[in-house]
Image (cartoon, grey):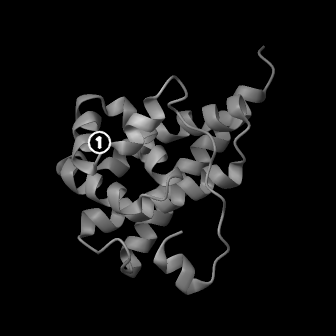
Amino acid sequence: MTMTEQDKGLPQIPRSEFTFFPVGDEAERVSQMDALHLAKAASEQPEMLVSLFHELWRNHREQDMYDMSTYLGSMEPWLLFIDEVPFDLVFMHVEHDEPLLQCEAFVGETLTVLAKSIAGVPVNGLLTPDLVQRVFEVYQVTMDQTNEFITQYRSPQA
């Protein structure tokens, strides 16, 4: 939970048990990498970006998420986030029974950290109202696409 959530008294949503790195010691290896090495891995394999952010999020490593985003710089991770996250959330929710509430928490908290990094606001700082609006817009698009994909996935094939 970020400091701003604590300040607002919002309920804590338990972090996910699900990992995109279930094979061997991958999750352990990722959990031991610093933000610079994670950013390097993400820049070499952009399709891993969401998986890496999720692993950091589920291990309460918001500062590393922030630093990783800062290192990625012009890559604008939240734009990649929009493209990739809905598919990953469908995988998490439908294939691995990840509660949608945890998926939503991951998206909202990650987008907030990314926005802070892009704007140069400290990870425990507050976003300006215009950035809060931008985060909400990206969150809404992401979750709308996710819900649409979940519906399509579950609908019988014609």
In the image, what residue occupies the spot 36% across and 55% down? 65
> Would residue 121 be seen by someone viewing this image from the given angle?
yes
> Would residue 83 be seen by someone viewing this image from the given angle?
no
- Left or right placement of residue 64 versus residue 59 in this view: left
Residue furthest to the top in view is: 158
Image height of 32 relative to 88, above or below = below
Image height of 2 relative to 104, above or below = below
- Left or right placement of residue 131 versus residue 96 in this view: left
In the image, what residue occupies the spot 65% across and 53% down? 102
Front residue (pair 96, 22): 22
Front residue (pair 133, 49): 49
Image height of 124 relative to 14, above or below = below
- Left or right placement of residue 20 versus residue 82 in this view: right
Image quarter hosting the C terminus: top right
- Mark 1: amino acid: Leu
Image quarter hosting the N terminus: bottom right
Q: Residues within 10 Å of mark 1 (few under 14, many from 20)?
A: many
In the image, what residue occupies the spot 28% across and 53% down? 69
Image height of 48 relative to 73, above or below = above
Residue 33 on image: x %, y %: 31, 43
Question: Which of the 4 image quadrants contains residue 113?
Answer: bottom left
Residue 52 on image: x %, y %: 40, 41
Count of all numbered marks drawn on residues in the image: 1
In the image, what residue occupies the spot 33% across and 56% down? 64
Residue 114 on image: x %, y %: 35, 59
Front residue (pair 25, 57): 25
Please tell me whether mark 1 sits on a helix, a strand or a loop: helix
Question: Which of the 4 image quadrants contains residue 157?
Answer: top right
Residue 53 on image: x %, y %: 42, 47
Q: Which residue has dot 1 on it?
A: 38
